Image: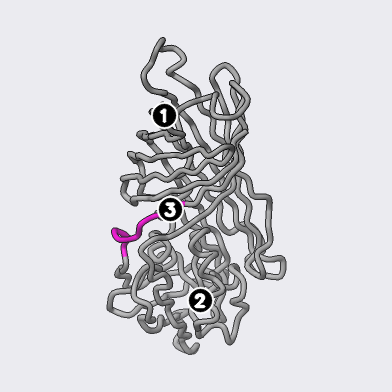
Amino acid sequence: MHTLQARLLPFLIALAVLVVPPSQAQNRDTDELGGALSSIGQQYADNYTQPITDALGANLNAGLFRTAEVGGEGIVPVIDLYVGVAGMGALTSGSKTAFRLSGEDIPTDDGTLTITYPDEDLPTVFGEETSPGQAIISDNDPLTPDETVDLPPGLLNTSIAPLAVPQIGAGTVLGTDAQVRFLPETSISDYGSVSLFGLSVRHSLSQYIPLSPVNLAVQGTWQSLSLSGSDDSINSGEIVDASGWALNAQVSKSVPVAPITFYGGLQYEQFGVDVGYTFQTSAGTSTVSFEQDASNNVRALAGVSVTLAVIQLNVDYALASNNTVSAGVGITL
């Protein structure tokens, strides 16, 4: 059990996916995501993974800016280039840790399967780290014996769910700059492949205000994340398709006698996840899909950045449904 959980844990934090119950490792390919999902019902998976979707949405919409100044950050006047990494952590103290589910029906090619769950609290991914017992899968045929599967325990006993993404920013044109987050399709061991793309466009408002005492800007961001199963998996195609957008208003003020900038902002955001996979047991096969929306919609944040020569460091804290801390390090030219 501990070996499987340790291998999937970092992937789960970053990509909002479900892991397989330990006992199934003996009879199916659970070393990759497609196999892990293949025997989990939709409603259970939906409840189990919702806290991770919330954390992923909170993280991906964090760390989008370090100052409201557009142009003038780098060593070349008006022209900026930023290359760095943003690290984010969604606080999990308010996340749901348990849910109740009596049962569900799964339509298959050969009929309908009925899954019966234990009459007790079932852990989410942030819940109790012990299995709540077994689910009973029946094809409603008295001549066919029922099948049992062990239900997954909570996997992440953590106060903060971390994520890190590379990002590149460039500008400015007519008071406008852009930032890209990009991870090409990358295979991760046997789990499948993941890709990430995000684009932010920011425009200065303070350029229209003569002698403005602070820098003001607005920014729009769109991000997309995709996860596919490995080629030899029953779920070899795209399993997770996640995307979201954010709009924010920024303000910052630099300290005249020190390389320090204080910044803050208000942001409206949405983030959603579409999950699709093949459910398969000895009693039948079915295509399962569901959608989830992250809980964060509005956040307020405040932070500070320090520039030492060409190295820029920043840290901020955001108040939202899932509070988030963000830190970044990069090179500014």
Disc 1 marks a residue whose amino acid type is: Val
Residue 156: x and y in percent read 41, 69
Q: Is residue 250 something that shows in the picture?
A: no
Q: Is 224 one of the magenta-colored residues? A: no
Marks 1 and 3, how far apart in space?
48 Å
The disc, 2 or 1, on the residue closer to the chain's N-terminal end is 2
- Is the residue 325 above or below the residue 42 in the image? above
- Nearest the viewer among 122 and 155 is 155
Q: Do the numbered discs 2 and 3 sit on residues whose CB atoms are within 8 Å?
A: no
- Nearest the viewer among 171 and 261 is 261
Whether residue 270 sits left or right of residue 102 in the image: it is: right
Q: Which residues are magenta?
A: 88-96
The disc, 2 or 3, on the residue closer to the chain's N-terminal end is 2
Q: Is residue 275 something that shows in the picture?
A: yes
- Nearest the viewer among 271 and 27 is 271
Residue 98: x and y in percent read 31, 69
Residue 315 quadrant: top left
Q: Secondary structure at mark 2?
A: helix
Question: On the image, numbered disc 2 is attached to which residue?
Answer: 5
Q: Secondary structure at mark 1?
A: loop
| The disc label shown at residue 257, or none | 1
Q: Is 94 one of the magenta-colored residues? A: yes
Marks 2 and 1, how far apart in space?
50 Å
Residue 94: x and y in percent read 29, 58
Q: Which quadrant of the rendered structure holds the C terminus?
A: top right
Q: Residues within 10 Å of mark 1 (few under 14, many from 20)?
A: few
Marks 2 and 3, how far apart in space?
23 Å
